[in-house]
């Protein structure tokens, strides 16, 4: 019995006698690709939401129908009152990460349902995700990943030598590529071009003429690819806190400088709004770099427990400061003015909390990610635009903080280009109406990138939500999304964008304030 036959038998498609009696028809049906079959929902969260679940079967390589196949779960969730009105198109969700599976996260999906109102939500794990078959697993990469373990990753804490830190990461990237190719997977096929084809076939098999799209983070980039390749299948797009694929492949140092500008802009807000902040940081434009240079000259060193009673030394230099702030700005922005002032003065008392030392995990995992897919997608989407090792080494030598940022630089060690069209990384050209939502304190995915996309998607509107970071959640987000879906051609009312108030600026160390109160 083949693997495919076993899968059909376990699903209870038909008893053996019936299969034998009509073998020709059964064989034709079971071999037809692509196809969609009813299936049990893969997670408790989907069952609790009364989702209708399917399994989508397709070629791994859309140009080779006789090669490997992929299977992935698809869930259709109707609004609470029953089927959506006929005039409300279904909303297809494009998950981010790339590779983050939300199918087991009930609160996450409930937020999506709240966002889209009385509409049908279609969500799925894309090819290579944890609930897909195959799932591109590289668990060893989780221990070193500069993306999933960003604060304590060896990429920034293993030593004070950037090239040593780089070698720890790149060796695991090479090992992951070897593992997946040895297992027979064509990793070049795990990219936004192939995923877009998967989604469009699912749309067709579900019987929808057109859809609305909702992307999250890098899922917004995949959604932009869907618009590029299947423009007749989509009416409107929501780019949530978007990371656009054709932009993510830019030189990694550019991403670092964009984030640094966000940090400096945050200090500028404090200086503009608070006289005490201006007095604390009279030269606020230089404060981020000064704090970084101080930590480069005298790194913060922490010792953490590891299994078997041993200890591990973590090194936090200026690069680690920028990398950590990249992740934590949304929660730490109010304390940033006094923190950089303390670091400049050589006072490291608050760095144990800032670097989350108590949260150190000696055996980090990424349970919602198939990390082999993460690498395959990031690198395959680059096509022939992958950097060479010389390119990436030069970027790290120029600025070691690149090691802790979104890792296109890793793709120099991935081993092959993705199978994407030559125009894959061109800016998508489209008249389709779109709404992009950004968080003000999101260093990775600010409004700069929507302004860029607006050049070729002139019907893109974008809104920045005050005080919020990546994946901003408030009532304003949901009300704007629903208004946009009701009438994508109409400008959204963004007057609620300041609904979330900024935290009061901290211009003295917390300990000093407690002493003053005493």
Image (spheres, helix red, strand yellow):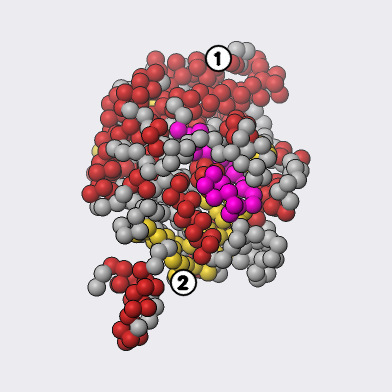
Name which residue lies at 68% across and 40% down.
Answer: 459
- Residue 495 is tagged as none
Q: Which residue is mark 1?
A: 286
Name which residue lies at 61% across and 66% down.
Answer: 78
Q: Residues within 10 Å of mark 2 (few under 14, many from 20)?
A: some
Q: Tell me the magenta residue range.
A: 227-249
Q: Which residue is mark 2?
A: 38
Nearer the observer, 273 or 247: 247
Please say whether residue 331 is visible from this viewpoint: no
Spatial separation of the CA atoms under disc 1 and disc 2: 59 Å
Nearer the observer, 72 or 498: 72
Q: Secondary structure at mark 2?
A: strand
Horizontal and vertical percent for residue 103?
A: 48, 58
- Point out the image quarter for the N terminus: bottom left
Please say whether residue 466 is visible from this viewpoint: yes
Q: Secondary structure at mark 1?
A: helix
Q: Is residue 396 above or below residue 45?
A: above
């Amino acid at each position: 019995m083949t693997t495919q036959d076993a899968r059909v038998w376990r699903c209870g498609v038909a008893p053996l006698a019936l299969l034998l009696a009509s073998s020709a028809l059964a064989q034709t049906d079971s071999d037809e690709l692509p196809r969609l079959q009813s299936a049990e929902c893969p997670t408790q969260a989907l069952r609790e939401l009364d989702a209708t679940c399917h399994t989508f079967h397709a070629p791994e390589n859309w140009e080779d129908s006789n090669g490997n196949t992929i299977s992935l779960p698809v869930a259709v969730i109707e609004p609470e009152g029953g089927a959506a009105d006929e005039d409300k198109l279904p909303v297809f969700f494009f998950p981010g990460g790339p590779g983050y599976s939300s199918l087991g996260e009930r609160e996450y999906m409930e937020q999506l349902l709240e966002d889209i109102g009385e509409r049908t939500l279609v969500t799925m794990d894309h090819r290579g995700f944890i609930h897909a078959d195959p799932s591109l697993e590289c668990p060893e990469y989780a221990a070193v990943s500069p993306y999933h373990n960003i604060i304590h990753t060896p990429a920034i804490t293993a030593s004070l030598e950037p090239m040593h830190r780089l070698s720890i990461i790149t060796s695991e990237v090479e090992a992951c590529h070897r593992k997946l190719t040895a297992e027979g997977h064509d990793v070049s096929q795990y990219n936004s071009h192939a995923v877009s084809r998967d989604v469009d076939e699912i749309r067709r098999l579900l019987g929808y003429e057109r859809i609305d799209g909702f992307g999250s983070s890098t899922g917004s980039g995949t959604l932009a690819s869907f618009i590029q390749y299947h423009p007749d299948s989509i009416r409107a797009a929501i780019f949530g806190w978007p990371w656009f694929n054709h932009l993510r492949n830019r030189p990694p140092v550019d991403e670092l400088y964009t984030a640094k500008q966000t940090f400096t802009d945050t200090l500028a807000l404090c200086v503009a709004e608070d006289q005490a902040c201006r007095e604390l940081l009279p030269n606020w434009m230089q404060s981020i770099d000064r704090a970084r240079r101080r930590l480069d000259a005298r790194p913060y060193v922490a010792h953490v427990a590891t299994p078997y009673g041993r200890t591990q030394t973590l090194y936090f230099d200026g690069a680690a400061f920028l990398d950590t702030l990249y992740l934590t700005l949304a929660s730490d922005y109010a304390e940033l003015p006094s923190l950089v002032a303390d670091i400049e003065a050589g006072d490291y008392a608050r760095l144990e909390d800032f670097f989350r030392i108590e949260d150190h995990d000696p055996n980090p995992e990424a349970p919602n990610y198939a990390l082999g897919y993460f690498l395959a997608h990031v690198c395959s989407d680059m096509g022939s635009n992958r950097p060479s090792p010389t390119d990436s080494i030069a970027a790290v030598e120029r600025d070691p903080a690149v090691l802790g940022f979104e890792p296109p630089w890793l793709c120099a060690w991935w081993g092959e280009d993705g199978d994407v069209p030559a125009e894959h990384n061109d800016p998508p050209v489209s008249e389709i109406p779109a709404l992009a939502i950004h968080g003000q304190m999101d260093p990775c995915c600010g409004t700069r990138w929507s302004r860029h996309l607006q050049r070729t998607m002139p019907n893109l509107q974008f809104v920045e939500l005050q005080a919020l970071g990546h994946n901003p959640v408030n009532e304003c987000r949901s009300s704007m999304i629903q208004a946009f879906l009701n009438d994508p051609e109409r400008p959204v009312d963004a007057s609620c964008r300041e609904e979330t108030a900024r935290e009061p600026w901290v211009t003295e160390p917390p300990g000093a304030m407690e002493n003053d109160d005493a």
